[in-house]
Image (tube, grey):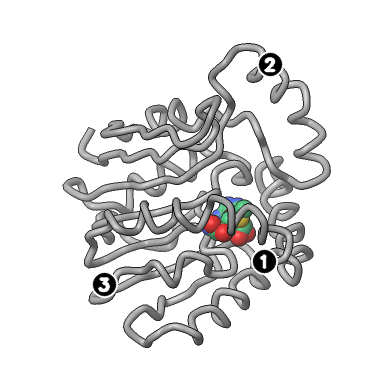
């Protein structure tokens, strides 16, 4: 087994374990901030063919645009069960087609989707550049990639502090708190269209990128 496969299996098992509690753990952050940000991201999604990567327990499903064909993927079977339950609470027009899949190895042909969206996913993907390259491959050249991500803070001291604690958060939660996702998006060959900073320290960002680079 390669190192990447090992970390990917760990990520899958970790999310399978936390899936039953995930919505409870995230509840305060969801109420305070995340829900508003999800609405902001999805209000810009045009589709009609949309891929959501790392769909989790389906927190974005209420925000999905109607009249779109949404495909959701996640590495964790148990998180996907949560997404199925969330989809049942929404009108049929928002129901995604859900698949267990690794973003680092997507089982879709190139240029399949108009828009690809991921929210709070790239802190836990073992090889984010590989995952973003796959997104680049499956998103149409005239399409858009939209990410809502927490990243390494820009102020130097805070950034260093996040670097220091990163091994702890990776070990405990499998989450990297110091990912430089804007750089990774560029490294994957995508062209940055717009970066919107949403919090102090620029920790949470909406990143819009184009595959036409
Ligand atoms: C922090 S959760 C975010 C879930 C959801 N996007 C949200 O906003 O609530 C991260 C999700 O990414 C998924 N994930 C992590 N690595 C992945 C990979 N390599 N391929 C697909 N999904 C992955 C996890 O299983 C988990 O559901």
Expressed as whole percent of the image width and height from the top left, the position of residue 50 reads: 31, 63
Residue 183 lies, with reference to residue 105, above or below; the image says above
* Front residue (pair 64, 50): 64
Structural crowding at the residue carrying mark 2, measured as other residues with C-alpha within 10 Å and reported as few (<14), some (14–19) or many (≥20): some
How packed mark 1 is, by other alpha carbons closer than 10 Å (few <14, some 14-19, many 20 or more), is some
Image position of 152 (left or right of 44): right
Q: Secondary structure at mark 1?
A: helix
From the image, state whether disc 3 or disc 1 is nearer to you.
1
- Which residue is labeled 2 in the image? 160
In the rendered image of this protein, does residue 105 appear above or below residue 175? Answer: below
Q: Position of residue 174 (x, y in %)?
A: 73, 45
Identify whether 146 is placed above or below 20.
above
Q: Is residue 102 visible?
A: no
Q: Dividing the picture into quarters, in which one does residue 150 lie?
A: top right
The numbered dot on residue 23 is 1
Please, what secondary structure does the residue beneath circle 2 have?
A: helix
Q: Earlier in the sequence, mark 1 or mark 2?
A: 1
Name the image quarter holding the C terminus: top left
Q: Do the residues bearing badges 1 and 2 touch, measured as CB atoms within 8 Å?
A: no
- In the picture, measured across the screen, residue 138 lies left or right of residue 150, that is left
Q: How many numbered marks, from 0 up?
A: 3
Nearer-the-camera pick, 100 or 54: 54
The circle on residue 68 is 3
Q: Furthest residue to the top? A: 156
As drawn, which residue projects farthest toward the left?
Answer: 142
Residue 43 image-quadrant placement: bottom left
* Residue displayed at 51% across by 49% down: 104
Separation of residues labelled 1 and 2 (CA atoms): 30 Å
At x 59%, y 57%, the residue is 30
Disc 3, SS: loop
Residue 129 image offset from top left, x and y in percent = 49, 36
- Mark 3: give few (<14), some (14-19) or many (20+) Cα within 10 Å: some
């Amino acid at each position: 087994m390669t190192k990447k496969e090992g970390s990917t299996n760990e990520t899958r098992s970790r999310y399978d374990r936390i899936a039953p509690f995930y919505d409870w753990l995230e509840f305060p952050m969801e109420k305070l901030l995340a829900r508003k940000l999800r609405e902001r991201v999805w209000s810009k999604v045009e589709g009609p063919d949309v891929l959501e990567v790392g769909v989790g327990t389906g927190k974005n499903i209420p925000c999905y645009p109607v009249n779109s064909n949404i495909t959701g993927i996640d590495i964790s079977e148990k998180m996907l069960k949560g997404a199925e339950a969330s989809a049942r609470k929404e009108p049929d027009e928002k129901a995604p087609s859900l698949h267990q899949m690794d973003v680092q190895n997507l089982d879709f042909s190139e240029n399949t989707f108009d828009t690809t969206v991921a929210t709070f996913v790239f802190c836990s993907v073992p090889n984010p550049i590989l995952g973003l390259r796959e997104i680049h491959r499956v998103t149409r050249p005239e399409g858009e990639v939209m990410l809502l991500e927490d990243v390494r803070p820009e102020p130097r001291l805070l950034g260093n502090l996040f670097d220091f604690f990163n091994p702890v958060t990776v070990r405990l939660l499998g989450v990297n708190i110091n990912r430089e996702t804007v750089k990774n998006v560029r490294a994957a060959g995508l062209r940055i269209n717009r970066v919107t900073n949403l919090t102090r320290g620029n920790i949470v960002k909406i990143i819009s990128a184009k595959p036409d680079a």
